[in-house]
Image (cartoon, grey):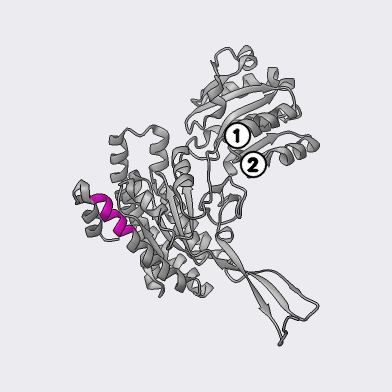
């Protein structure tokens, strides 16, 4: 989208704003639909070449991307974003390189389109194949994090889908700079630059316009806070890959190795507090709470984490603030951790399934049977044993990148990568059969 087009939407009178946005989004949808038809048939090598070129352009334009990001940071600071949200928004040279590396990693993935998922022969001689196909046009609505722009665009391209991106108002300039890299790479590779487009306005009316665009958009992927997810699920006229809150739990079992428990607890909470894989609640078995909790609490406090504990936890570590019922339901996205002492694995699993968002849970234990029970009984998209919840990421799973973590149960669950952005069709080959 050109700077002029952005200005046209930004400068219209209030009465005309909604109509202008509706018209612009509809035109974006039409172009995306046309691009999707061609992209679905594009050779794997062409898509790979386009993504490799996009990674090159991101590296070559790193200074321009950083300058655009600084404008967004200024906007975010003026808007009063907290430190965690500003951290999600900020693009350091290392993060820009990480974005480029993610795009390159996506390019190197096996092409998901055309995979034969299953095949069989019928007694009448028909040969049937279930084959992976693109979904079509994917709308992605997300908040603050500009790296999602590149991840989503690259994954959609790899899986043969056109993307319509609606990033957070704070990341408008950063996202535009990254989309420019993707679009230019598409065009240089002989593909339509309309295969990756962004909606160039901060106006919230654009979200509603996109959610109503069912004739051009096949699926919506929301990535953000609870209010955004609820709005998308309520208003969307197309299927939704739901990504609810990352209310992640870490359970320190009675048979936990103390060294592993301390290291994992610190990393799961404090490596990056503003991501959806950050632990928000620590559950610790009462059998080891007296010995392990003071050590873990001290390490977390020294790192700047505020602890909010139940009565049992506060008896062991009196410096903790008192946890209230709402704490168990809260995704802090900040250096705050709620702590509860539990009486065994049954109580731990019950807490996770009652209060959690079905995102990511982890157990620390040397008891394999206990680990197997926890992994089987926690009703979440990702369950881990002796590993930090911060590994809940498509890149860490070897998927190149992810478009989000789906906490629903339909079609895709967990990290949504290129394979999960495909549907399928059946190919049936015969030799003249007719049905009696």
Residue 118 in the image: state x and y as whole percent. 70, 68
Compared to residue 235, the image places residue 128 above or below, namely below
Labels 2 & 1 near each other (Cβ < 8 A)? yes
Compared to residue 377, the image places residue 193 above or below, namely below
At horizontal 34% and vertical 61% (from top left) the residue drawn is 26
Q: Is residue 375 left or right of residue 102?
A: right
Counting residues from the N terminus, which is met first, the one under dot 2 or under dot 1? 1
Residue 185 in the image: state x and y as whole percent. 39, 67
Per the image, is 21 magenta? Answer: yes
Q: To which quarter of the image does residue 83 belong? A: top left
- Quarter the N terminus occupies: bottom left
Q: To which quarter of the image does residue 267 belong? A: top right
Residue 373 shows up from this direction:
yes
Q: Main secondary structure of the magenta part?
A: helix
At horizontal 53% and vertical 51% (from top left) the residue drawn is 241
Front position in the image: 163 or 340: 163
Compared to residue 111, the image places residue 402 above or below, namely above
At horizontal 71% and vertical 87% (from top left) the residue drawn is 432
Q: Which residue is mark 2?
A: 380
Residue 263 shows up from this direction:
no
Mark 1 is surrounded, within 10 Å at the Cα level, by few (under 14), some (14 to 19) or many (20 or more) other residues, namely: many
Q: Secondary structure at mark 2?
A: loop
Q: CA distance from mark 2 to mark 1?
A: 8 Å
Q: Which residue is mark 1?
A: 356
Magenta segment range? 17-25
């Amino acid at each position: 989208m050109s700077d002029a087009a952005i200005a046209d939407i930004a400068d219209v009178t209030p009465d005309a704003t909604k109509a202008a946005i509706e018209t612009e989004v509809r035109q974006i949808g039409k172009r995306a639909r046309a691009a999707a038809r061609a992209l679905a048939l594009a050779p794997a090598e062409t898509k790979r070449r386009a993504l490799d070129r996009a990674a090159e352009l991101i590296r070559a334009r790193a200074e321009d991307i950083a300058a655009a990001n600084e404008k967004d940071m200024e906007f975010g600071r003026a808007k009063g974003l907290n430190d965690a949200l500003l951290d999600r928004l900020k693009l350091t040279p290392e993060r820009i390189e990480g974005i480029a590396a993610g795009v390159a990693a996506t390019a190197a993935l096996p092409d998901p389109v055309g995979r034969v998922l299953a095949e069989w022969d019928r007694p009448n001689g028909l040969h049937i194949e279930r084959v992976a196909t693109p979904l079509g046009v994917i709308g992605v609505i997300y908040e603050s994090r500009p790296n999602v722009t590149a991840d989503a665009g690259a994954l959609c391209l790899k899986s043969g889908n056109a993307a319509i991106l609606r990033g957070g108002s704070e990341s408008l300039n950063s996202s535009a700079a990254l989309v420019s890299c993707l679009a230019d790479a598409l065009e240089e590779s002989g593909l339509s630059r309309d295969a990756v487009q962004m909606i160039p306005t901060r106006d919230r009316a654009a979200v509603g316009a996109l959610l109503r665009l069912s004739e051009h958009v096949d699926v919506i992927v929301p990535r953000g806070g609870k209010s955004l997810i609820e709005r998308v699920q309520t208003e969307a006229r197309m299927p939704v890959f739901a990504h609810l809150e990352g209310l992640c739990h870490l359970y320190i079992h009675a048979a936990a190795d103390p060294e592993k428990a301390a290291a994992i607890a610190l990393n799961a909470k404090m490596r990056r507090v503003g991501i959806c894989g950050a632990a928000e609640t620590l559950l610790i078995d009462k059998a080891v709470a007296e010995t392990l909790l003071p050590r873990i609490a001290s390490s977390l406090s020294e790192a700047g984490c505020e602890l909010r504990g139940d009565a049992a936890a506060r008896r062991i570590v009196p410096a903790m603030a008192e946890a209230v019922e709402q704490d168990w339901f809260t995704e802090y996205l900040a250096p705050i951790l709620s702590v509860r002492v539990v009486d065994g694995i049954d109580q731990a699993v019950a807490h996770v399934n009652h209060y959690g968002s079905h995102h990511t849970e982890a157990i620390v234990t040397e008891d394999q049977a206990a680990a197997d029970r926890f992994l089987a009984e926690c009703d979440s998209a990702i369950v881990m044993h002796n590993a930090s919840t911060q590994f809940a990421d498509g890149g860490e799973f070897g998927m190149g990148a992810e478009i989000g973590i789906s906490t629903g149960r339909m079609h895709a669950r967990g990290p949504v990568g290129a394979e999960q952005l495909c549907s399928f069709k059946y190919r049936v080959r015969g030799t003249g059969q007719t049905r009696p």
